[in-house]
Image: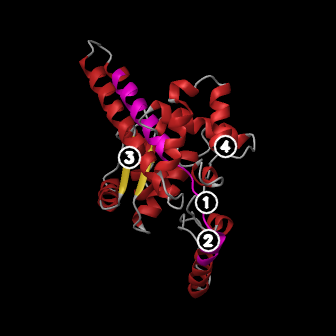
Amino acid sequence: MIDKNAIDKVIDIISPDDFYRDVHGMIYGAMIRLSEKKTPIDLVTLTDILEKEKILEEIGGASYIASLANAVPTASHVVHYANIISQKGVLRRLIEAGQNIAQLGYEEQDDVDAILDNSERVLFDVTQRYLKQEFISLKDVLSETFDRIDKLHKKKGGLRGISTGFDDLDKLLAGLQNADLIILASRPAMGKTTLALNIAAHVAIKEKIPVGIFSLEMSKEQLVDRMLCARAGVDSWKLRTGQLSDSDFPKIGYAMGVLSEAPLFIDDSPILNSM
């Protein structure tokens, strides 16, 4: 109310339900509506909209609105105040989520999986509301870009990202890079899984970079069998049917030793979700 531009600084930081007292959330909500209408926010316009919405007396009347304006000498620290309100709001929602999860634990239900899903959803709702995107100065991005270009120049032809182990693919992608979403698509039984596993094994073994594999289709045993056969150069059909020759066992033993040292991790849980 004492700074007409203050709302623009905090509107992306806090929401009406971040306030502990409902009346303060109602006042802030009215400020947002005034801002959306491009109406200046001051004691007169705020009192007017609250009166039109028939909630002025519920809040405490015009005198209470005036007392709030007089309670703060300056609006120069409005962003700091907004961050405090936002953080306190998150903490209250965490407390509420914890109480709800505890209540779920006391309920007499046979379906434990449903209770776990509900608990995860309650906690996920809180974390999603707290996480927010922030604008980044172009100057900062350009500085990071220059550093990256300088490193590439010093490499003299090195990849910008992580090598896949396939030269032609690396030339097309310049390696696997941060924030990239790469989709392997083809008709069934064309080798998508094998290609993905070979790339994962190369990154973990050769590049020494940890790799996580989430599988909703194949079990961890099936995935490991495929990686073993690829690394050992053994026919997968012979492995599945137990028709390995004596010469195959040393190859498999060596492949197992290499893979066991690689930072590869597999999750084949059938109920993977956002948590």
Query: Is disc 4 surrounded by few (<14), some (14 to 19) or many (20+) residues within 10 Å?
Result: few
Residue at 58% across / 75% down in the picture? 144
Q: Which residues are magenta?
A: 115-143
Image-based side of 225 in relation to 157, left or right: left
Ranked by sequence position, the earlier of labels 3 and 1 is: 1
Q: Nearer the viewer, residue 56 or 273?
A: 56
Query: Is disc 1 surrounded by few (<14), some (14 to 19) or many (20+) residues within 10 Å?
Result: few
Nearer the observer, disc 2 or disc 3?
Answer: 2
> Which residue position is annotated with label 4?
186
> Which residue position is annotated with label 2?
141
Ranked by sequence position, the earlier of labels 2 and 1 is: 1
Nearer the observer, disc 4 or disc 3?
Answer: 3
- Check residue 266 in the rendering and tell me which mark sits there, or answer none: 3
Name which residue type carries label 3.
Ile
Q: Residue furthest left?
A: 106
Pointers 2 and 1 in contact (C-beta within 8 Å): no
Q: Quadrant of residue 103?
A: top left
Ranked by sequence position, the earlier of labels 4 and 1 is: 1
Nearer the observer, disc 2 or disc 4?
Answer: 2
How far apart are the alpha carbons under marks 2 and 3?
34 Å
Query: Is disc 2 surrounded by few (<14), some (14 to 19) or many (20+) residues within 10 Å?
Result: few
Query: Is disc 3 surrounded by few (<14), some (14 to 19) or many (20+) residues within 10 Å?
Result: some
How far apart are the alpha carbons under marks 2 and 1?
11 Å
Name which residue type carries label 1.
Phe
Nearer the observer, disc 3 or disc 1?
Answer: 1
Ranked by sequence position, the earlier of labels 2 and 4 is: 2
Ranked by sequence position, the earlier of labels 4 and 3 is: 4
Task: Tell me the quadrant of the picture where the C terminus can be found.
Answer: top left
